[in-house]
Amino acid sequence: MTINSPEGNQALQAILADPGLPCSSPTKAFWQEPPFPFPEPNESTQLPQQCDVVIIGSGIAGASVAYHLLQLNPGLSITILEARTATSGATGRNGGHIKDVPWNDYDEFVEAYGREAAKRFVRFKLAHLDAVTEAAKSMGIAEQCLVRRVDSATVNFSAERWPKVKEARERWLADFPELRSTWTMYEGEEEILRRFGIRGAVGCSIVPAGAIWPYRFVTGTMNVLSKKHPDFKLFTLTPVTSIASSGNSEQPYIVKTARGSISASHVVHCTNGHAAHLLPILRGKLFPFRGQMTAQAPPPTFPRVGHERSWSLRDKKRFDYMTQSPLSSGEIFIGGAEDGRLKEFGCTRDDELNPIALDHLSKVIAKDFEGGEGTRVVEKWTGIMGMSLDDLPWVGRIPEEVSGRRREGEASEWIAAGFCGNGMVSAWLSGKAIAEMIVGGEDAVGEWFPKQMLACTMERLNKMDPEAYTKARLM
């Protein structure tokens, strides 16, 4: 495959490449300091020879699978294998949002999957605010992970783009009229400056959302599980090198690592942008994408509103996302980029920064916000998202044609990955769906789950064209 453009061809080849294992020495993320002190086996501890479920990846999807499996069946033996330190991937490096703006792609999903399926997908994403908040409270970790409900401002600076946003919003609200009173809108530079202290914006939508310290939520979850369930184990610095068939009908999978192998009845791939490393058929369909994040210290003049507000800042060339600490220090967490996004397609180098995006992010607060002059970057890091050609996650049983390994009875490989930068409003309940299917069979998952849209099928794979996808993003 080639594209008649050096930039496009480079992006295409990166999408098609093996994403490999995560970099061994990633940039330091603000969220991950200090490391959360929960018990885990040390480097000399032997892997269990066998267990019921092996989960690959210790982000929010992997933690959710374990959490919900042990709620359904507390007697299961579960091992999470992590290539690096705990929650060191996308979950531990993101912006801290629990937010969806559903009208952004609602029309496309209605056209592709039908209105009822698209509505179910919207409800699924919006349900994450309650699900994550309630899970944190029930485990007693809400305070440590700073989970909170906020009104999130989605701010548009493009006069050309704003009318299209309004039209899309109205079409979405026509199908969700019960939400109209809580999904409000403001227009005009003076109005938005007065209400929100943001300069130069033409329109702003206020949406119910949440914010969280994601690393603490996930490590807190695993800490709770390790204390309650002796057969729950997390092994860090244990990359999975391959998966093989065992020939044993009860535990048909052998998960191989440098520390030894584990036989398992079920294997769950929660490796997001790296999923195609162990599942090569997904290359060119599910691929890594690097994002740039910063933690910034605002001056005393900047309002401390992190307990009630978050932001997304959009125009034709950029999409920046921003939360603020609810503590008196008021650190601002802002990520995104202005241009050059194709260069990040297929990129797994979270051990390096993106200088173009970093330069842009360092200027946003002073340029767009009243009282933002003097804000300075105090931490900067990158993270690897998992992108899908159809902009949807992959959640469900992995067919034999995809894994290349034979299934035995109800034992299976599963996937929860490719969250397209929206993991905080899709991963937690995806993990719940996987748990329900492992325990009760594929048909056991409730109607709340948009199985039709997210399933891992050959039909879905065969519809995907990486060349057309890349060309579309050159326009």
Image (spheres, grey):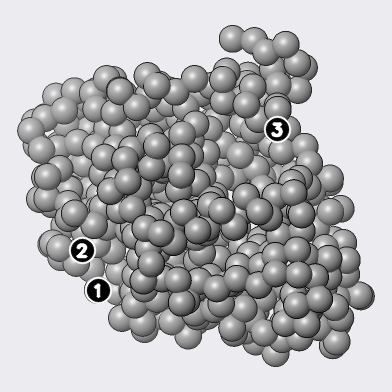
Label at residue 373? none
Is residue 384 positioned above or below 94 on the image? Answer: above
Residue sitting farthest toward the right: 374
Q: Are marks 1 and 3 in contact (CB under 8 Å)?
A: no
Report the front residue among 267 and 364.
364
Label at residue 342? 3
Point out the frontmost of discs 2 and 3.
3
Label at residue 228? 1
- Judged from the image, the secondary structure of the residue bearing numbered disc 3 is helix
Using the rendered view, name the quadrant where residue 240 is placed.
Answer: top left
- What residue is shown at x 49% (from left), y 31% (from top)? 389
Please state the total of marks drawn on the protein image.
3
Point out the frontmost of discs 2 and 1.
2
Q: Position of residue 137 (x, y in %)?
A: 36, 82
Point out the frontmost of discs 1 and 3.
3
Q: Is residue 49 left or right of residue 222?
A: left
Graded by Cα atoms within 10 Å as few (under 14), some (14 to 19) or many (20 or more), the crowding at tag 1 reads few
Using the rendered view, name the quadrant where residue 233 is placed.
Answer: bottom left
Gap between marks 2 and 1, in whole Å?
10 Å
- What residue is shown at x 50% (from left), y 58% (from top)? 170
Q: Position of residue 52 (x, y in %)?
A: 18, 48
Q: Is residue 135 left or right of residue 474?
A: left
Say what amino acid the circle numbered 3 marks.
Leu
Q: Which residue is mark 2?
A: 70
Q: Are marks 2 and 1 in contact (CB under 8 Å)?
A: yes
Say what amino acid the circle numbered 1 marks.
Lys
